[in-house]
Amino acid sequence: MATLTFAEKISQAENFLPIHGTDYIEFYVGNAKQSAHYYKTAFGFQSLAYAGPETGVKDRVSYVLQQGKIRLILTTALKSDHPISEHVKKHGDGVKVLALWVEDAYKAFEETTKRGGKPYQEPITLKDENGEVRMSGIYTYGETVHMFIERKNYNGIFMPGFEKWETDYQPSEVGLLYVDHCVGNVGWDRMIPVVKWYEEVMGFVNILSFDDKQISTEYSALMSKVMSNGNGYAKFPINEPAEGKKKSQIEEYLDFYEGEGVQHIAVATKDIIHTVTELKKRGVEFLSAPPNAYYEMIPERVGTINEDLKKLQELGILIDRDEEGYLLQIFTKPVEDRPTLFYEIIERHGAQSFGAGNFKALFEALEREQARRGNL
């Protein structure tokens, strides 16, 4: 039986929830002003919009940053008894909202809730002089939320309630283009129920599966399934711990995040050498590079690539191939003090997979960091 291409796999998804891509990712953080400064300085995000007491929002402050098609919202509560403050107290800085750009936010809410989605935000229309944004939301794993954003009738800077955020401090971009995928970590025996939820509530399809034989090292293991909508614009791999000799990276995340949540955000670039070089200059730390033997095997394992292998090795960038092409990827260390959220930088040359050939090298690098923290 012939292996299906990724396009053929995602075509099997249901189409009751048309998604055009990621609209924004919202973080709940302890200090949004300082977090915004970090993302501008380290990652080259640009100031876009602001909401807070000055715009009529009395209980929180939000800064919106943009680079390419990626929008981040960094939100902080202004009082200690606010639910956002409770979220940060429990989880640390982390992703609360994975917002999806949809054709009809009201219909998205109706379709997903009647299939079992738990409501988070009843459908609402926000209006100002620039038009209207319609939005709704449901819970996914843990306390994480999918918001559905419909903005076809809006011409403002971001959405009603926000004003343009202008600042003299604006470091240059680093070449980040769009959100490729967002990975969630769930607890023991929770991957299958979450996968089933994405299939039944969101109409997604499982396009890739990895078991603990494929994703393991001498010490630890995990299992993963990749969920995608029908056009591939929204992809959510779901990870679950597996039994191993020592604590896995997923268990460490669950311990320190104190629950299920977003483990990493993968962002695409067309020039990973330039992007990673710039990020390193700005202080972004990456996992340690694999040994020389990894790169010596690339011609045999991956074949011909367009990039200078020596430069990729100097930067510690990983390389893998599938039936449709190859990809380049690298992972940051956690970007906060808790060993939770990190980023992946990815450049695709036809490949639609997720670097299965790099799993061993990646997880050994993660384990070295775990060992340094005393958590392996």
Image (cartoon, rainbow, N blue to C red):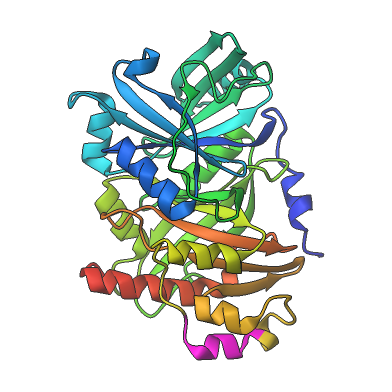
User: Residue 364 at x, y = what percent?
Assistant: 40, 76
User: Residue 15 at x, y = what percent?
Assistant: 72, 32
Q: Which residue does the image show at 44% across and 47% down from the upper left?
A: 40
Q: Decide if residue 91 is on the left or right side of residue 45.
A: left
User: Residue 18 at x, y = what percent?
Assistant: 70, 30
Picture layout, residue 104 above or below residue 273: above
Residue 131 visible in the displayed image? yes
> What type of secondary structure mainly makes up the magenta span?
helix
140 part of magenta stretch: no
Picture layout, residue 360 above or below residue 10: below
Q: Which residue does the image show at 59% across and 66% down from the upper left?
A: 274
Q: Total number of numbered labels? A: 0
Near-viewer residue (156 or 300): 156
Q: Which residue does the image show at 26% across and 74% down from the upper left?
A: 371
Question: Quadrant location of residue 366?
Answer: bottom left
Q: Which residues are magenta?
A: 290-298
Q: Decide if residue 271 is on the left or right side of residue 167.
A: right
Picture layout, residue 249 above or below residue 156: below
Quarter placement of the N terminus: bottom right
Q: Which residue does the image show at 54% across and 73% down from the upper left?
A: 317
User: Residue 129 at x, y = what percent?
Assistant: 58, 8
Residue ranking furthest to the left:
80
Quarter placement of the C terminus: bottom left
291 part of magenta stretch: yes
Residue ranking furthest to the right:
2
Residue 201 visible in the displayed image? no
Q: Decide if residue 96 is on the left or right side of residue 327.
A: left
Near-viewer residue (133 or 158): 158
Near-viewer residue (238 or 264): 264
